[in-house]
Image (cartoon, coloured by chain):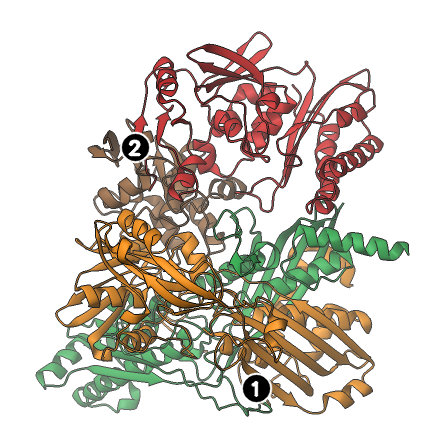
Chain colours: A green, B brown, C orange, D red
Amino acid sequence: MKKRGYGIANMWYGIGNTANPNPSGAFVDFLDDGTAIVLTGCADIGQGSSTVLAQIAAETLGICVEDVVIVSADTEVTPDAGASSASRQTYVSGNAVRLAAENVRNQVIAIAAELLNIPTETVSLSQGEIWNSDKSSGMSIKEIINKCRSKGILTLGHGSYNPVTTELDPETGQGIPYATYAFATQVSEIEVDTETGIVEVKQIVAAHDVGTAINPQNVEGQIEGGCAMGIGYALLEEVILKDGEIQNPGMSTYLIPTALDVPEIHTIIIEESEISGPYGAKGVGEPALVPTAAAIANAVADALGIRMYELPLTPEKIIAAIKNRKEVEAI
Amino acid sequence: MAQFHLEMKVNGKPIALDIDPGLRLLDVLRDILHLTGTKEGCGEGECGACSVILDDELVDSCLILAPQAHGRGVITIEGLALNGELDPYQQAFLEVGAVQCGYCTPGMILAARVLLNHNPKPSKQDIAKAISGNLCRCTGYAKIVQGIEIAASLKETKAGVSRA
Amino acid sequence: MPEYNIIGKSVQRIDGPRKVSGEAQYAADLDIPGALCLKVLRSKVAHALLQGIDTREALKVPGVVGIFTHVDIPGINSYGIIVKDQPALTNRVRFKGDAIALVAAEDEASANKALRLIKVSLQDLSPIYDIREAMREDAPAIHETGNILSVYKVKKGDVESAFKQADVVIPGSYTTQRVEHCYIETEAGVAYMDNDMLVIKAGTQNPHYDRRDVARVLGLAMNKLRIIQTTTGGGFGGKLDISVQCFLGLAALKLGRPVKIAYDRQESFVATGKRHPFFIDYITAANREGKLLAVKVRIVGDTGAYASYGPATLLRAAVHATGPYEVPNVDIEAFCVYTNNPFSGAMRGFGTPQMAFACESQLDLVAQAVNISPLEIRRRNIFQKGSLTATQQKLDVSVGIGKTLEAAWEKALQVMPGLGDENK
Amino acid sequence: MPDLSEYYQPQSLTTALELLAKSGGKLRPLAGGTDIVPAMSKGELKADGLVDLSKLPDIQRISVDGNEVKIGSLTTFTQIETSPLIRAKASLLAEAAAAVGSPQIRNLGTIGGNIANASPAADTVTALVTLDAKARLDSLKGSRRVLVSELLCGAGKTNIHPQEIITEINFKIPPPGSKTGFIKLGRRKALAIARMNLAIIFNVKEERISFARVGLGAVGPNPRRYVVLENSLLGQTPSEVLIEKFAIEAECEVTRVLGSRPSAVYKCEAVKGIARDLLTKLFLDSGQGVV
């Protein structure tokens, strides 16, 4: 018999290393033709950090994203940006790039204010132009950088950022382990076959507070991918050991979800702006996965009326649990 | 060991090579022809990263020996873009954000191409089935499926452009 | 909300065009003419002292250019992001898969042939696979520091008296499994000398850390070592550790020739970190309105043969153990423990998916006990602006859990018709 | 890389058979390669040489001869899955072929290879034994036809001689009006090895089941027919009660076969689930799978 169940799970996730320094640095070189090079140690492993950092630099410098080149993760030319882990790169390296870009921007603004003879406070950079309050000055950023060059000023910026945390007391753990947290709620709908023990995830709703979503499509991609990995964690995946030896060291024996195993995922982005984040951003990489298995386990418990205490929720365990309850009830 | 004289068409170009017959099609593509867009992920036909099109059908190039492709036509990811212009499948993947780490992407795009050749108006379920032999660990597949849906509509509007 | 030009826009990935065209070069795609092929001899036993390695027969294989063991390490033979406990090439085996020798050959077949001819003599030590056994005081130590690598505590209030005052006290014991990252790209890289600079190109999540530890192992000044991240086919925490980097650096440095290595899927499974299996004992206390009063949590994480990111994983698990909920009294202890299993390290979530499973299961059990819905118990306990966490951190800004909870529920009611029926 | 000392790609069956006969067991026939190639690359399987059958003419055809269907042994799973003829005459076999691996594997893997591989969980083999299919084996000495069920003699074992090649699979079309179906229980929805699979053929005359075949795979060493289960259907009227009865019979059979094996607890229960799903589909969907 097929039974349906619903489960809900929340999560929180501290952005950056726990109660440990994890600084990131960046350099920005704003060039005479109005393009920019960003040097960052941040490794893009597929999550899209280079794109996000390019967006942050472009926004800050007032140019379009196509005019930014990211040079990343090369120890000879890029500064240390720490690891692409702990969901920290948008927040930490994003801040480093923002600060480096602001550094250059301020130089450009100072020269522009001088040339236009207006106060620096009213000058801004946007769409490749110099703006005076909400009006274009008619002068392009390129012209200003050329002016800088002719005066012998290089428009180079550097920035670094380290999240504000404290050490934790070794006995009580009291302190500030993270500068900011991402939050999420996921709701899953599942169907479980009480004879085959197969659990089918029918839908997942995933609402994630990521701070400002610098690139919403990337955020959605992280959430969808996290949910898929969470489904694997909940139902399929287990490295099986026998006397310390992996019994399933291959993709035909260690099973991850296929396109047919991942249901529709309804993503909702909540943007609870983080004042210390670059343009209000926090992070999403890990949070995407964290509550998924919990929500599925709660849905299975809802469907069966049996709580499972061991991941993954394999058909064998589910059948054993159902049998076990029948035996208990029979006594 | 006797060499095998292999003749096949790769991305439309005739190729003739004397090879060790124990080489897989994947090895010939990557190591001899330097077509490294075809990836090896598992070596046992599970992940689909090594997918190529063999005479209009999608196959895992790690599962067949190169001589088995003798006399046949192979299309790899490098054979899709024409004069540097991306084809509709590649364009659609970019538009919807179907690419993250990108390692499964060539295989996925080739799977999409085969699907749309056989079935120009696939349902979501048809698409999921067609890419069920291509594992992706990053995206959760949603944007890949969406990309293929868009490629289908792009192909329809640019029917003449399609080089399929 | 300020108006931005580019922030908040779904601009296309800057690395996208090269990835869809097949031009993106991942580590295994790099073609360096004349590069030697590297292969690693890995232990088939879990715990042993190395007594000798005889490479004479292996070195006679035509095409074999060099074989290296622990004696060939020029620097300090240990690395690790938190604890430097993992040797590049070991003289004491701690898990089935530990690296013992490195072969460099002109081609893969010769390298594989040489691997089979290396004779290793080992003195077996008794292996410990069970974490509870590893924690016993009389258990043989896998590392000199003992098997309990770290203990983290988060404590506030008075849990025992809260348990006495509570209307419901619910215990639960949870177990989670060992998980593989299974990025589709396995570990690979190349290395070569560029004048006196050693250059290593590899898929990695942290090139600057790689530089630090590879320089340490090879005895190089950090400015004589350049690590370049190649396009990386996923990481999820699994490419934070050193994998191929020391092997590449050692061989290129010793032989002065370009070298290349690529793990096949099996080696990727055997040789790299996993998600920690956790054993969690969780006790939750609440009043009859479903307000949480206390949690007591004991977490034991199997970090296997080497620390990798184990301490960070257990620390994060301890800090996040309450979930995003106000709990006035907490008593949390987390233990990171060595065994002779494959090592566990960082994986997406760093110990928090395990904790979410336990914590959120507990919450549903409490809701059931006090007869309120899973939604309601969460509404009553989630963090608000101004809430104090278990570590007494005051959450002042950007506390979005209330919004995610309501938004998720509202959407779920729309798309999951069955949900409304039972929660009315 | 597979270490091969000899590789042949004959253009005719006679040449292929001569090569096998001469080699004295050293050469192995290569069909789709989906099992052999990765096993050889990983060093799990050694072969001195291969006789690649892919260029042989006429062994990739599906045809009807009277009331018999003939399938060339190198026919791929995709060809079987999409064959209008198989879908019309033996839909269970099309369904079984569709359940194999992934599109890529179905495009390469062949029905002959699936038999020769003799996996306990082979999807098409469960359908074939249920159809009482025979395999034609050719060698220089002549040819013989053997029931697929008799060709298999244990997990990974067959009675195929080293000089023989499976060239054709044939079976009688189930009686007109028969319903047929196949169901697979896997850990995931694609790329799964069957935990169990079940194939059923039956025919109803005057409201009673007059003909029944039931095959189960991944229970014993090879898929086979289960006469006890067939008998439990014969003479009965399709109904929910019958589905229930059949599910319980299936549980008993699997329990009897598996005994105290570790997988027994799960499979005995799970077989009820797949039995119920498949029979419900066949009893209720009036058009489904009718031959």
Determine whether D25 is above or below C235 in the image: above
Q: Residue at x 69, y 59 (%)?
A: A299
| Quarter residue D206 falls in | top right
Measured in 3D between alpha carbons, the distance from the residue under mark 2 to the one under mark 1, in whole angstroms, is 70 Å
Mark 2 secondary-structure assignment:
loop
The residue indicated by pointer 1 is C395
Position in image of residue C231 (x %, y %): 31, 60
Mark 1 neighbour density, 10 Å: few (under 14) some (14–19) many (20 or more): some
Give the farthest residue toward the right: A331
Q: Is residue A307 above or below residue C19?
A: below
Q: Nearer the viewer, residue C129 or D210?
A: C129
Residue with the mark numbered 2: D5
**Image location of residue C263, percent across then percent down:** 36, 56
- Label 2 marks a residue whose chain is D
Q: Nearer the viewer, residue B8 or C363?
A: B8
Label drawn at residue C422? none
Q: The residue under label 2 is which amino acid type?
A: Ser
Residue at image point 30% right, 63% down: C202
